[in-house]
Image (spheres, rainbow, N blue to C red):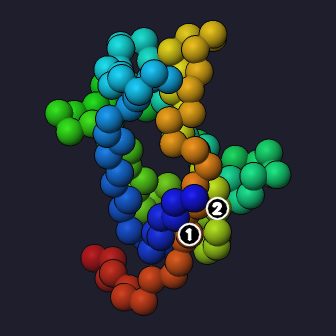
Amino acid sequence: MEEIVLVKGDTLKLCIENIRTADGSEYTLSETDVIYIDIKKDDNNGNVVLKKKLTFADRSASGLNFMLYPRETADIPLGNYVFDIRLVMDEDNIFTIVPMSRLKIIRNITEIPRE
């Protein structure tokens, strides 16, 4: 299981590259595809701490861009979380493209002055 460590107050940028179909061939997002990312305290807890939705518009030449901004994590307590990333093509075609992984939010040391 992968783990991402995020310092609270930082920006997290991930690029999802090379989405593969069940047969291993590369998949190109269509304009109707939607990608969902749920961050939860644990996998037994139905409470979503943060939900993100990505679409065709979020893609770039290098892949699908996923951003977490400081304001989005400001109210999330420090600690360990789980997430996965799911691609929804339509109601009959839903695929987990990043299986359950861990996100660890740690405290920062340097304070940024507010001007």
Q: Are marks 1 and 2 in contact (CB under 8 Å)?
A: yes
Considering every residue shown, the one lying at the far front of the view is 23
User: 73 or 54: nearer the eye?
Assistant: 54
Q: Residue at x 58, y 14 (%)?
A: 93
Above/below status of 47 relative to 17: below
Residue 17 image offset from top left, x and y in percent: 31, 39
* Residue type, label 1: Lys
Determine if residue 23 is in view: yes
Q: What label does residue 81 carry, if any?
A: 2
Residue 90 image offset from top left, x and y in percent: 56, 11
* Residue type, label 2: Tyr
Quarter of the rendering occupied by the C terminus? bottom left
Residue 30 image offset from top left, x and y in percent: 35, 14
Above/below status of 41 relative to 93: below
Q: Is residue 109 left or right of residue 94?
A: left
Considering only order in the chain, which callout, 2 or 1, is on the residue closer to the N terminus? 2
Residue 8 image offset from top left, x and y in percent: 48, 72
Q: Is residue 45 left or right of residue 95?
A: right
Q: What label does residue 104 carry, if any?
A: 1
Determine if residue 36 is in view: no
Q: Residue at x 32, y 46 (%)?
A: 15
User: 42 or 7: nearer the eye?
Assistant: 42
Rate crowding at label 2 as few (under 14), some (14 to 19) or many (20 or more) other CA atoms within 10 Å. Answer: some
User: 3 or 26: nearer the eye?
Assistant: 26
